[in-house]
């Protein structure tokens, strides 16, 4: 930390050497080669992905007019079946609400287990994290597919799918929030002689609750959007009607449903956003 | 008498009903180190934000070479360098790249966008790092440095700007006394040894640092200047007046 005390010439030399070193590292052949190699690898990767994804811009160019044609057929909207759609939409929202609530309740104890700083069983930390990662890695859609086979067609399979996937995702977010929260207040309350559970409830929950609730609202919002397609695999809700319309090539019906979904999802986003702002 | 290097005239600033600066005036000359003392809430931070052009004054003016700081735009601002309490380095950049930020007011914008500086700018930045004793740390990431080292890099960044004035807002408040003394000594030596004669305005919470390193001490209280003396003339009575003078009779 001492300021330079050597002679001015020696300092000039040191600066010169540092400059030469810096420029050599910046402009030297090693760096150029590395950059070229990285560019080659990344370029190759994108080329490979392009092939694997079977990107075909000609097909897009010929397909787009088809979409336009369907759009033209979509007007006027088909309002005669609106009561049916409304019932199906309500089913979708019910699935999202029940699934998210169940997931949030299940996520709380799991989040405690999966938080390094407060878990009562440190040896269960990694198993808990693995389980959450597994639940998170499998989409609601895939879970719903499995549950349709197990409990039959209908929204119940959708609720189970949403609940399992959201359980993993929400618990991980909860745990991250808990791990980020300072343990200062927890230590302080613990040192008053309070037990671990009491300390968690007394010291952590007041600060965390708004964030946890906000996270849950976010998942509910997300799940309403996600569950609009669960019907495609037979797990109930508006997705079923969506698929039927597509199968029948009934575009005015199809676009009426899409419009309904947009209206409902937008309204719920607004509601959830407003609620979350009130919470934090 | 010629115009001072830097001058604040009757600075006034309020936030809503709260008056933060109430007609504060001060001046600082080339090669002079001015310490600003005052209790918390006296308006030090507001004053410094206004001096640095980070916030506008409601009335009055801050003048560098007689030119209004508030009217300075873009590159003109390089004449006033700021050193912050929390250092404000870019964590993921190397010490050298942080110092090179001081050259951004001198070089074409594309060099900044590509972070590609010319040889002379890099040499000058390395000299600035050497000036603060950190040449060996040039390639280290800023967040790998200690607090004292980070503040030295921030001072090197200020030097790389080739400023006429360095404004340091509580530069040692986040450092331990020993490291803080080193940083203060560095600021004082930059101020006193520099060929160009850079002026330094530095706010502090430690009167002893002010008396040891500054040439002159200005006391700020309730947004006004209540003390303006040579550092060696600043005695306990003056400090008592500044920090608690008014409160004692009321409590007695």
Image (cartoon, coloured by chain):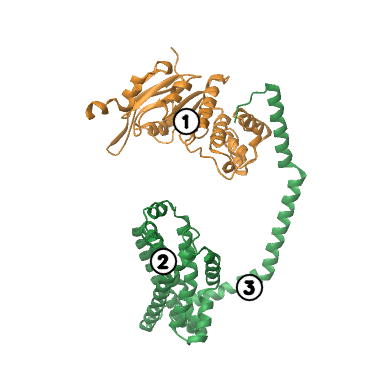
CA separation, marks 2 and 1?
Answer: 45 Å
Residue B144: tell me if it is visible: yes
Residue B79: tell me if it is visible: no
Numbered disc 1: what chain? B
Chain letter matching colour orange = B
Name the spot of residue A155 as percent of width and height, x first: 43, 82
* Callout 3 secondary element: helix
Please tell me which residue is depicted at 43% across the width and 67% down the height of the picture.
A108
Same chain for mark 2 and mark 3? The answer is yes
Name the spot of residue B155 as percent of width and height, x first: 54, 31
Q: Is residue A38 left or right of residue A173?
A: right
Instruction: Out of A121 and A269, give the one closest to the viewer.
Output: A121
**How many residues crowd mark 1 within 10 Å: few (<14), some (14–19), many (20+)?**
many
Locate the N terminus of chain B by quadrant. top left
Name the spot of residue B220 as percent of width and height, x first: 35, 27
Q: Is residue B33 left or right of residue A207?
A: right
Q: Is residue A236 left or right of residue B98?
A: left
CA separation, marks 1 and 3?
Answer: 63 Å
Residue tagged 2: A216
Residue tagged 3: A59
Please tell me which residue is depicted at 67% across the width and 22% down the height of the picture.
A8
Q: Quadrant of residue A123?
A: bottom right
In the picture shown, does residue A244 fall above or below B229? below
Residue at the far bottom in the pictured view: A152
Locate the C terminus of chain B by quadrant. top left
CA separation, marks 2 and 3?
Answer: 41 Å
């Amino acid at each position: 930390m001492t300021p330079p005390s050597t002679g001015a010439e020696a300092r000039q030399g040191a600066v010169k050497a540092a400059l030469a070193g810096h420029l050599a590292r910046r402009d030297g052949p090693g760096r150029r080669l590395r950059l070229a190699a990285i560019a080659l690898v990344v370029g190759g990767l994108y080329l490979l992905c392009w092939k694997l994804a079977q990107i075909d811009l000609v097909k897009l160019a010929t397909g787009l007019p088809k979409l336009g044609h369907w759009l033209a057929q979509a007007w006027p909207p088909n309002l005669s079946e609106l009561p049916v759609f409304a019932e199906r939409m309500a089913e979708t929202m019910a699935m999202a609400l029940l699934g998210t609530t169940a997931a949030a309740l299940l996520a709380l104890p799991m989040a405690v287990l999966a938080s390094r700083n407060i878990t009562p069983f440190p040896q269960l930390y990694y198993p808990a994290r693995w389980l959450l990662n597994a639940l998170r890695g499998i989409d609601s859609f895939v879970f719903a597919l499995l549950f349709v086979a197990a409990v039959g067609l209908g929204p119940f399979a959708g609720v189970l799918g949403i609940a399992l996937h959201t359980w993993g995702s929400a618990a991980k977010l909860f745990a991250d929030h808990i791990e980020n929260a300072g343990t200062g207040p927890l230590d302080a309350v613990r040192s008053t002689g309070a037990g671990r559970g009491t300390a968690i409830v007394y010291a952590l929950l007041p600060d965390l609750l708004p964030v946890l609730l906000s996270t849950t609202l976010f998942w509910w919002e997300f799940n309403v959007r996600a569950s609009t397609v669960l019907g495609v695999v037979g797990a109930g809700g508006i997705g079923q009607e969506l698929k039927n319309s597509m199968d029948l090539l009934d575009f005015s019906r199809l676009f009426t449903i899409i419009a309904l979904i947009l209206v409902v999802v937008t309204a719920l986003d607004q509601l959830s956003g407003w609620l979350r702002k009130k919470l934090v | 008498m010629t115009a001072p290097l830097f001058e604040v005239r009757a600075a006034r600033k309020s936030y809503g009903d709260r008056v933060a600066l109430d007609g504060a005036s001060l001046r600082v000359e080339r090669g002079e180190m001015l310490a600003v003392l005052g209790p918390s809430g006296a308006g030090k931070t507001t004053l410094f934000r206004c001096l640095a052009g980070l916030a506008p004054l409601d009335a009055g003016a801050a003048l560098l070479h007689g030119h209004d700081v508030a009217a300075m735009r873009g590159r003109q601002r390089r004449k006033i360098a700021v050193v912050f309490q929390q250092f404000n380095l870019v964590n993921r950049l190397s010490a050298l790249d942080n110092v090179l930020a001081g050259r951004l007011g001198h070089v074409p914008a594309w060099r900044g966008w590509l972070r590609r500086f010319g040889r002379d700018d890099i040499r000058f930045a390395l000299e600035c790092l050497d000036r603060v004793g950190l040449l060996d740390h040039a390639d280290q990431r800023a967040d790998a440095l200690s607090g004292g080292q980070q503040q030295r890099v921030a001072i090197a960044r200020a030097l790389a700007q080739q400023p006429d004035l360095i404004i340091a807002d509580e530069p040692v408040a986040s450092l331990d006394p020993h490291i803080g003394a080193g940083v203060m000594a560095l600021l004082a030596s930059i101020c006193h040894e520099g060929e160009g004669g850079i002026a330094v305005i530095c706010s502090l919470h430690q009167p002893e640092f002010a008396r040891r390193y500054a040439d002159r001490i200005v006391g700020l209280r309730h947004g006004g200047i209540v003390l303006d003396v040579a550092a060696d003339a600043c005695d306990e009575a003056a400090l008592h007046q500044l920090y608690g003078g008014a409160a004692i009779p009321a409590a007695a």
